[in-house]
Amino acid sequence: MRQIFRHITRAAPALLLLAGLSLPAPQALAQATPAGAANLERLIQDRLGAATSNEPDQFRLERVPEVQVTAQGDIYAVSLPKLRLLTDGGWLLEAPVVEAEVKPLPDGGWEVEASIPQPLSVFSERGFRAGDLTIGQQKLHARWSADGYLLNAADLSLANVAFHPTSGGGLFNLASLTLKLDPARVTGDAWTGIFNLALGGLNFQAPTGMEKIALQKLRLRGDAAGLDLTKFAQASRIWRGGGLPTANQLERLATALKLELDLAGYQQVHNDGRRTKLDSGGGTLALDGLSGDRAGMRLDWRHAGLDRRGADIEPALVPASADIALNGSRLPPTPLLALLATYASDTSDGPRKAAREQLFTAMQTAGSNLNIDRLSLKGPQTAVSGNGAFKFASQNPRGLTGQADLSMSGIDRLIAAIQASGGTKAAGTAIALYAVQGLGQPEQGADGITHRYQLQILPDGRIMLNGNDMQNVAGLLTR
């Protein structure tokens, strides 16, 4: 999933760059004039000059084109010939000419209507012409702040986007992409409103013919209250470049955020050979109190048809379907946002572990509460369900106390599958599961034997399972 969002968050700013490079500073008048056009032309050239000096891991312009601006009634007509956009990998997109209409607004802001020419020439990192990128349909409409740096509203849509290589294999198709930002209120840098991102029919094949990414559809809807546009823009640039925003860059990013995600038909072959497949997934994440010292969280997530394969992946432990509901209170906002940003942008273990540890420590200091309202995980051989509640506190040896009531079925089948896999961690995991099975309270059900457990983390640090000390078993499970 990280790669999909990386592609989306990189493509959308590139379109905005093509559509919005002509945005001026607020010296322009509400009525377009020849003098205003001349002034605007100089301002655009200055802005384009800044766009050539972006960080090397972001989209940037290769050079400043010859800008042409004319006054036409209440708008400025802007023409940018030979706009050449460099990607972080050294690839280059060349547009013969980008045309835009810039309308000064009474509040000092700017409306921009732009069009991208057809086709866009694509050159590889070695300078050879790799092919053409065509866009069947497009709409690029945006509204910016008075200084031209902050995007306040947008209505962007593309359809039938395709890459046509000059030789060799490779394929990229995108049936549709839409991005809408609909503000309810903008006060200074604080933005409150709704945003929607949707795409469908994404397919990318390597020159060998292997399908690398496929996605039937994705929809992301968000509600933001008091979103700091300046901080969000800074964090987005870092994220698009492959980096992670720092805690200071995420502090007091917004008052409240709510995200709703739905996706279907996702498949990916990773560069290291791992394979991921997901039939469908969706959920809601709601955060409030982000502008204070303590935040609240609510997470609901469901998925079906998850299958992951790879050298270090045990398929028997992958939950093919899940239904999870969590809620938390007194959470530290900045480390929480940092964790979410890390998981959304980086799949490597190191950054994720560091973000988890930072949040865990902060939750102890804050005295956070985390409740598992609903937990249902089903794999090929087993199923786990339950609920629980935990309290974080720095004075406890493990940093938290609490308990969970769990039930697990199919342990015999799970142990057999893990032993048959022969993975590097198979022996230790199987031994731990044998111990867990022996400590459970068995009950005969319609689908076989179900083992029930009460898990407790006591104030003295002991982990108890049905009254038995689990320290040794827990050590095996975490190896």
Image: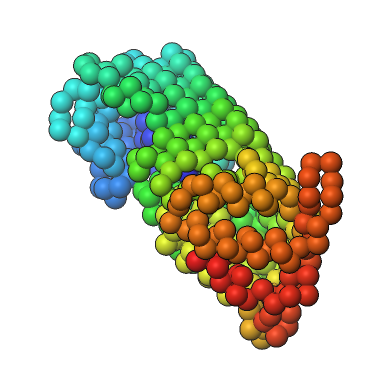
Q: Front-most of 301 and 26?
A: 301
Q: Front-most of 85 and 461?
A: 461
Q: Position of residue 77 (x, y in %)?
A: 38, 23
453 with respect to 317 (left or right): right
Q: Front-most of 327 and 111?
A: 327
- Corner quadrant of residue 379: top right
Q: Residue at x 63, y 60 (%)?
A: 433
Q: Residue at x 47, y 27 (%)?
A: 214
* Res 24 visible: no
- Corner quadrant of residue 447: top right
- Corner quadrant of residue 221: top right
Q: Residue at x 45, y 52 (%)?
A: 423
Q: Position of residue 411 (x, y in %)?
A: 68, 52
Q: Position of residue 26 (x, y in %)?
A: 44, 43
The image shows residue 471, relative to residue 432, as above or below, that is below
Applied colour scheme? rainbow
Q: Residue at x 21, y 27 (%)?
A: 123
181 with respect to 284 (left or right): left
The image shows residue 318, relative to residue 221, as above or below, that is below
The image shows residue 207, relative to residue 22, as above or below, that is above
Q: Front-most of 431 and 211?
A: 431
